[in-house]
Image (cartoon, helix red, strand yellow):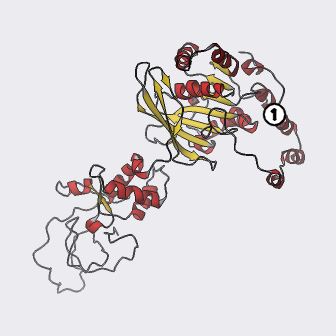
Amino acid sequence: MSTDTEDIFGDGPSSPAIQRLAEIHASNSPQEILERSRVDLISIIEHGIPDREYVPGAQGILPKAKRIHIAAAAKSGKSIAFATVTAVRIVQAGGTVVELDRENGEDESARRLQTVLEAFGDSDPLRQQVRERFHYHAWPALRLDWSAEDYLQAFTGADIVIFDSSRSHTAPFGLKENDSDDWATFTTALIDPLMQAGISTMTLDNMGHEAKDRPRGTTSKVDLSDLIYTMKANRPFSLAAKGLVEIQCTESRIGEITTGDTWQMELGAGHYGNWQKIGAKPPEARDDIREAAIEVLTAAGQAMGHARIAKAIRARPHNKLKFDDKYLRDGLQAWAADPTSGVLPGPNEKGFTTSQITESSHGGTVHHNPHGETLPPRSTTAPATTPKTPTNTSKTPRVDAPTLTHHGDQGGEGDPLRGTTPTTPGPKNHHNDGPETVIP
């Protein structure tokens, strides 16, 4: 490939945004750079802040001039969903798409495009629209040392540029996608200039093996993006079977699209639909939060209120979940009403526990505190009589560990959940999180 970036897209007049960026990059002194880059925000407010714009054909999902990162499981259909179906929808709406494909190649991409065109009627006008405004590039050899002006000039007229996929674009530069500085180098050179010139970018990526709510590798992928979507196939699809894919916003830097916003699209078997918004997922639909709640409840080995469960989830070393306490409380209440969820109401309907604790009470399962430390074995039978006070007052009476403090406990009842031995009365706990057992 030629080092002349015009080979990528074609020449054309520079837009005002490109000209302004070129002037900024051509400046030398600090004063000149700051003068050229200064913007009067009050003037923008007084003259009217422009309405939020979106890429044509992707209203509400793909905002204009934003860095969008989409993560999905490998081979789950993200390329056909976005780089083919959504790309053609954008073209139909009058937009221009540039796809930089280092993942699938021209033959596979042509096969996918053909099936989508056939589903959309495969008319001569549609083919002409795709030929003119869908600029597909197979295995482009990009460079990090292009000047911003030359690089942007190559994409004049584009509404969105699709990088498919993340690793295949960083690897030729020797950049590691799990290194924050390497990802920042890639973004600074090839993604940020497009965004600054008013062009949206979409980077397709795989999800991590453990973190299912964000892209794999460095967290800089999240930090240096304006929107993060995760995609999954709710129903598998193929040329013969109609399926359903779903995207959910997990991180957002703009107010119009918020965390939890969800869209679905049918595709496969000769049918390719539109993205349909289904609204934010209710908390009870968040299996990742339910599993985290069960994890901390099992580790604690006792009933807990929603605020303490939330705190314990966030305190996990590997935690990536974001939610507010009310959202979690609503989810816990819904799960506690579902016998199959694994979450149960606490004793006397106070707090929450888990079926794993109830089941293990008969099997001698080892329990851990929220920090992962093994708790001492618990007594399963209470002594018939209260131990006598020792005659030697210099020695402390032996009490089974751990000593537990209960809300309002007077020391003679024990713990009905855990079968603990009655202990000497301790100070009352004044948590406002329900009458639950407290680990010292």
Identify the residue at image location x=55%, y=15%: 114
Instruction: Name the residue that disc number 1 marks.
Output: 18
Give coordinates of residue 137: x percent, y percent.
65, 19
Q: What element carries label 1?
A: helix
Can residue 140 be seen from the camera position used here?
A: no
Q: In this view, does 85 lie above or below 138?
A: below
Q: Give the residue type at disc 1.
A: Ile
333 and 211: which one is in front? 333
> Label 1: how many residues lie within 10 Å, few (<14), some (14-19) or many (20+)?
many
Residue 348, placed above or below residue 279: below
The image position of residue 432, as x and y in percent, is 41, 73
Residue 356 rendering spot, x and y as whole percentages: 26, 53
For image coordinates 43% across by 59% down, the residue present is 310
- Quadrant in which the C terminus appears: bottom left
Q: In this view, does 49 lie above or below 112?
A: below
Q: Quadrant of the N terminus?
A: top right
Left or right of 89 in this view: 399: left
Q: Nearer the viewer, residue 328 or 244?
A: 244
Please state which of residues 135 and 394 is positioned toward the viewer in this rendering.
135
Question: Along the horizontal axis of the image, is 219 left or right of 141?
Answer: left
In the image, 276 versus 245, the foreground residue is 276
Indicate the position of residue 53 as horizontal and vertical percent values: 70, 40
- Picture quadrant of residue 144: top right
Seen at 23% across and 65% down, the residue is: 417
Whether residue 33 can be seen here: yes
Relative placement, left or right, of 15 versus 289 is right
Question: In the shown orientation, is residue 388 left or right of residue 287?
Answer: left
Residue 332, by quadrant, is bottom left
Identify the residue shown where x is 31% and y is 63%. Answer: 303
